[in-house]
Image: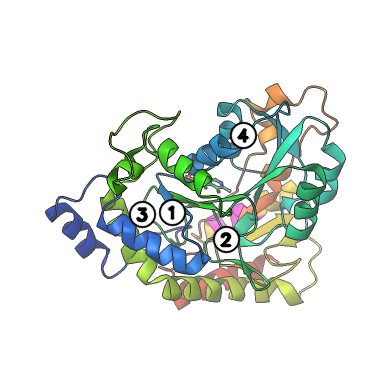
Amino acid sequence: MIKFHEIYKSAKEKEYILDALESGSVSGDGKYTYLVERELSHIFATDKILMTTSCTHSIELALDLVKRDERDEVIVASFGFPSLATAVLKAGFKPVFAKVDYDDMNIDPEHVKSIINGNTRGIIAIHYGGFSFDIDKIMKLKNDHDLFLIEDCAQAFLSKDGHRILGTIGDFSCFSFHGTKNITCGEGGCLVINSNDESIFERAHNIRQKGTNRRAFQRGDASNYYWVDKGSSYCPSDILMAYLYGQLEEREYIQNRRKYIFQSYFDFFKDGKNDLVESFSGMKNSDGGNGHLFYILFKDSHNAQSFIDHMRVREIAVHKHFYPLAQSPMGQNFIEGSSFEGENDLFDRLVRLPLHVMMEDGDIETVLKALKDYF
Ligand SMILES: Cc1ncc(COP(=O)(O)O)c(C=O)c1O
């Protein structure tokens, strides 16, 4: 069986985890959190980075940092992960669903433009599959309408848009190191704050540490450790950061192998005319991706299902992806009065191929042969 996903085990992660355990550095903000933050600071060229327990928590934290006014709507793509809508709700905003562009499954700037109104406060946009959404158009809308922009980079660690690394453009950027991601620690995330305003960074630390001034106190800048703000507990254990540090050390190998597998699939689709397929990963623009996933969007859900059956017979695991938020049981509560009611058939038309570092060359060949036989 060719698995859809399998976690890569880096050479040193066990050693680092044991070191964290044996040195007693098991709660948050210890040695490995510092080491990970230092690596990420180099990658993103900023020190405004906070390690968190998940991308979901990073989005919640970012939303807590947004300045409030009377506007209460936040636009998210309907073809997206529930975390976005859930975080929006928890923060007291209302989610408003936007379409995606079927050529790359990223949020459609034209549709976003058409649904912005006097109540719109911000946009959370996913870089789907590690490929950048149309940053320039979304940034223009952000600037023209005085909105906040959160980049959901859960799938886009180390991806680029031209020379820009994703996660350095919006006001806030949220990453995931969940077990399904390229670089993982099981459950984890980080928040990148793209502002030089130290007070926002300090406040983020307070919110992340249960609403306390723990950071200032530890620095010696506060005489007491006490409650200063609303907050939650978003700080990961140093054991997780030890795991992540081991993975980060091998990021080049991990990314290169994933990109190699991605390229093999991409090459199969890029040249061939395909009557069955509406789009596939990298079709619109294949630059800058991180080899996170490879999707095929079929024109017809029956073909998608027959493809899934074909791959199953060959013992190759393939998966669908997001169930559109607007169609989901919870999302139905937020579409009343909206001219856009979601994309009913997307869930049944999009199929992802296996893509992970544990795949051997023979596995890639087997998948390619199965693609050739089907198409
Ligand atoms: C686009 C997107 N955003 C957010 C998340 C949530 O990430 P986490 O599990 O780290 O909270 C995911 C998880 O798969 C995702 O794909």
Q: How far is disc 1 from disc 3 in space, using C-alphas? A: 6 Å
Give the mark, 1 or 3, whose residue is nearer the N terminus: 1
Query: Could you say whether the residue bearing mark 4 is in a helix, strand or loop?
Result: helix
Say whether marks 2 and 4 touch (CB < 8 Å): no
Please give the label number shown on residue 177.
Answer: 1
Which of the marked residues, 2 or 4, is nearer the chain's N terminus? 4
Residue under numbered circle 2: 293
Residue 311 magenta-highlighted: yes
Alpha carbons under labels 4 and 1: distance apart = 20 Å
Cβ atoms under marks 1 and 3 closer than 8 Å: yes
Mark 1 or mark 2: which comes first in sequence?
1
Identify which residue is drawn at 63% across, 35% down: 67
Q: Identify the element where label 2 is drawn.
A: loop
Q: Which residues make up the magenta segment?
A: 307-312
Tally of numbered tags: 4
> Of label 4 and label 3, which has the lower sequence position?
4
The amino acid type found where label 3 is placed reads Cys
Q: Secondary structure at mark 3?
A: loop
Q: CA distance from mark 1 to mark 2?
A: 15 Å
Identify the residue under disc 4: 85
Residue 59: give its label. Answer: none
Residue type indicated by callout 1: Phe
**Which one is closest to the eye, mark 3 or mark 2?**
3
Q: Is residue 231 above or below residue 359?
A: above
Is label 2 within 8 A of ligand 1 (CB to nearest ligand atom)?
A: no
Does residue 77 appear in the picture of this structure? no
Residue 287 vs residue 215, the one in the foreground = 215
Where's residue 134, x and y in %?
75, 58
Vertical placement of residue 293 versus 193, above or below: below
- Find out whether the residues at labels 1 and 2 contact each other: C-beta distance under 8 Å: no
Residue 36 visible in the picture: yes
Q: Is mark 3 within 8 Å of ligand 1?
A: no
